[in-house]
């Protein structure tokens, strides 16, 4: 393409400032480092992977069928299980 027919160059998009909470929780993607937290990789063992996906599918099916637990109940049970004070 000749210089006279070159496409115009767009200015870089302006980035929105990250919230203070997100700045504390992870690094910015443009710092050249990986963002935190990084989830663990999927299991390489086919049996473990199949069990994981089956468990996820069962959870989705339970939610669609209305078999859910209220957040307050789940929070209380988790806090009791781990010895944390009530909220």
Image (tube, rainbow, N blue to C red):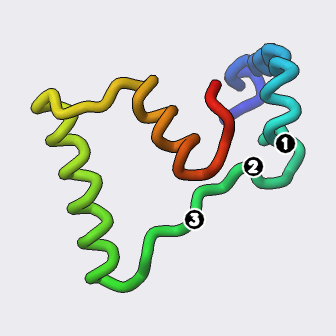
The span from disc 3 to disc 2 (Cα, nearest Å) is 12 Å
Contact between marks 3 and 2 (CB within 8 A): the answer is no
In the rendered image, residue 19, in percent from the top left (x then y), is placed at: 82, 18
Question: Disc 2 or 1, which lies upstream in sequence?
Answer: 1
* Kind of element beneath mark 3: loop
Q: Earlier in the sequence, mark 3 or mark 1?
A: 1
Foreground mark, 3 or 1, reads 3
Q: Which residue is mark 2?
A: 36
Tag 2 secondary structure: loop
Where 7 sits versus 29, above or below?
above
Name the one closer to the observer, 7 or 50: 50
50 relative to 86, above or below: below
Q: Residue at x 83, y 38 (%)?
A: 28
Q: Which residue is rendered at x = 10% and y = 32% of the image?
A: 65
Label 1 sits on residue: 27
Q: Residue at x 29, y 82 (%)?
A: 46
Q: Foreground: 65 or 11?
A: 65
Badge 1: few (under 14), some or many (20 or more) residues near its Cα, within 10 Å?
Answer: some
Q: Where 31 falls versus 48 (above or below)? A: above
Q: Residues within 10 Å of mark 3 (few under 14, many from 20)?
A: few
Q: Position of residue 42 (x, y in %)?
A: 45, 69
Q: From the top left corner, tell me how far across and down residue 2 is, in percent.
A: 71, 32
Cα distance, mark 2 to mark 1? 6 Å
In this picture, residue 55 sits left or right of residue 8: left
* In the image: residue 4, left or right of residue 60: right
For the N terminus, give its image quadrant.
Answer: top right
Asked if the residue at tag 1 contacts the one at tag 2, i.e. Cβ–Cβ closer than 8 Å, the answer is: yes
Lateral position of residue 34 relative to residue 77, left or right: right
User: Tag 1, which secondary structure?
Assistant: loop
Give the number of the disc on residue 40: 3
State whether residue 51 appears in this view. yes
């Amino acid at each position: 393409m000749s210089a006279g027919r070159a496409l115009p160059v767009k200015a870089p998009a302006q980035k929105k400032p990250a919230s203070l909470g997100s700045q504390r929780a992870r690094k910015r993607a443009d710092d050249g480092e990986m963002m935190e937290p990084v989830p663990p990789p999927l299991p390489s063992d086919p049996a473990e992977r199949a069990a994981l996906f089956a468990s996820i599918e069962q959870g989705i099916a339970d939610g669609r069928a209305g078999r859910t637990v209220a957040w307050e109940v789940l929070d209380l049970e988790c806090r009791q299980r781990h010895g944390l004070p009530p909220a």
